Image: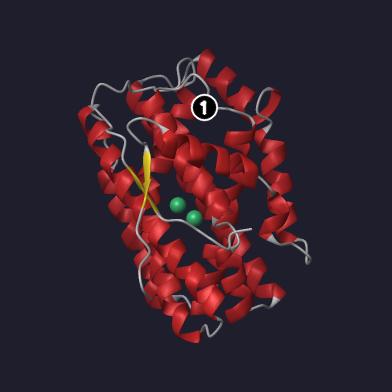
């Protein structure tokens, strides 16, 4: 499934003429993914620190190789999403203080105080969340009609999340395979992820002055229910993660991811560029 994970650089220019709400007619989904963009770099830096801390315990050369490729992909996601912060700044959003607070109060605190088994379990669960978000956004073509540059950023990231979705889970099985460990990580991660992302998306909608509108509630209801079914589908994906026989490969989506990445690499100029292999 992910035997060959290819690190890629996101080469698209994210010019400042990208509209604030880059998915026309859907301020809710634009704001949710803007919140995702803000939270990604600190999140992914935490995954990288956690994997680096686990690596000395990993002897299987194939898993080590997959971990190194995972780290390189996540590092590039952080770089590309942070580039987009320049657009959020130009649009007048205030979010940097919140981002710093989250990084310090949650991720850096976890580094210091949470045992490695819990950190590995958090990363395993959040990687499942990243992968099923990617799967839902790509399989339902939710970003059709979006500004092509932001759509490319999100779809590249989602495709790579699908590509490397099993690495953190397999790493957790290698360092701490107990079921209670998986449960503890899942409960913490799902709560934190949805609180932070929804909280920040709401704050962005408040800054736009569009939170208390009929249209916003209609868009949220369509995203969660009638159109994208994200409430039901999220519960289903989280429930799957709790099944004792779960493995990320069961999610599927490899073809969807491969299509996105091949199309982006073949574009003129290319949207993503494969990076050279690196010695361990
Ligand atoms: Fe990522
Ligand atoms: Fe990831």
Q: Nearer the viewer, residue 143 or 233?
A: 143
Look at the picture and state if 100 lies above or below 197: below
x and y percentages locating residue 149 in the rendered image: 36, 29
Residue density around tag 1, few if under 14, some if 14–19, many if 20 or more, within 10 Å:
many
Q: Does residue 60 appear left or right of residue 234 in this picture? A: left
Name the residue at 32% across, 49% down. Answer: 99
Q: Does residue 116 appear left or right of residue 180 in this picture? A: left
Q: Nearer the viewer, residue 89 or 1?
A: 1
Q: Does residue 188 appear left or right of residue 270 in this picture? A: right
| Secondary structure state at the residue bearing disc 1 | loop
Which residue position holds label 1? 143
- Quarter of the image with the C terminus is bottom left
Name the residue at 52% across, 44% down. Answer: 159
Q: Can residue 44 be seen in this view?
A: no
- Quarter of the image with the N terminus is bottom right
x and y percentages locating residue 170 in the rendered image: 61, 70
Look at the picture and state if 154 lies above or below 27: below
Mark 1 CB near ligand 1 (8 Å cut): no
x and y percentages locating residue 141 in the rendered image: 59, 28
Name the residue at 39% across, 22% down. Answer: 21
Q: Which of 42 and 113 is in front in this view?
A: 42
Q: How is the image coloured?
A: secondary structure
- Picture quadrant of residue 63: bottom right
x and y percentages locating residue 204 in the rendered image: 37, 31
Q: Does residue 154 appear left or right of residue 172 in this picture? A: left
Q: Is residue 97 visible?
A: yes
Label tally: 1
């Amino acid at each position: 499934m992910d035997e060959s994970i290819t690190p890629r650089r996101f080469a698209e220019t994210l010019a400042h003429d990208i509209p604030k709400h880059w998915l026309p007619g859907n301020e809710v989904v634009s704001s949710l993914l803007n919140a995702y963009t803000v939270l990604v770099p600190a999140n992914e830096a935490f995954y990288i620190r956690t994997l680096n801390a686990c690596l000395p315990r990993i002897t299987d050369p194939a898993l080590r190789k997959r971990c190194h490729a995972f780290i390189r992909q996540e590092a590039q996601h952080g770089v590309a999403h942070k580039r987009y912060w320049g657009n959020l700044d130009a649009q007048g959003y205030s979010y940097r203080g919140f981002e710093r607070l989250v990084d310090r109060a949650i991720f850096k605190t976890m580094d210091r105080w949470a045992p490695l088994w819990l950190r590995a379990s958090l990363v395993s669960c959040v990687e499942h969340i990243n992968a099923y978000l990617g799967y839902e956004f790509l399989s339902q073509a939710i970003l059709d009609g979006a500004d092509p540059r932001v759509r490319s950023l999100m779809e590249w990231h989602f495709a790579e999340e699908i590509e490397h979705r099993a690495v953190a889970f397999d790493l957790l099985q290698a360092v701490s395979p107990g079921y209670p460990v998986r449960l503890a990580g899942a409960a913490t991660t799902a709560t934190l992820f949805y609180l932070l992302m929804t909280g920040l998306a709401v704050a962005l909608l408040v800054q736009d002055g569009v939170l208390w509108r009929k249209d916003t509630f209609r868009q949220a209801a369509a995203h969660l229910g009638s159109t994208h079914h994200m409430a039901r589908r999220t519960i289903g994906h989280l429930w799957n993660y709790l099944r004792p026989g779960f493995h990320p490969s069961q999610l599927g989506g490899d073809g969807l991811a491969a299509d996105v990445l091949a199309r982006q690499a073949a574009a003129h100029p290319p949207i993503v560029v494969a990076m050279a292999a690196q010695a361990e």
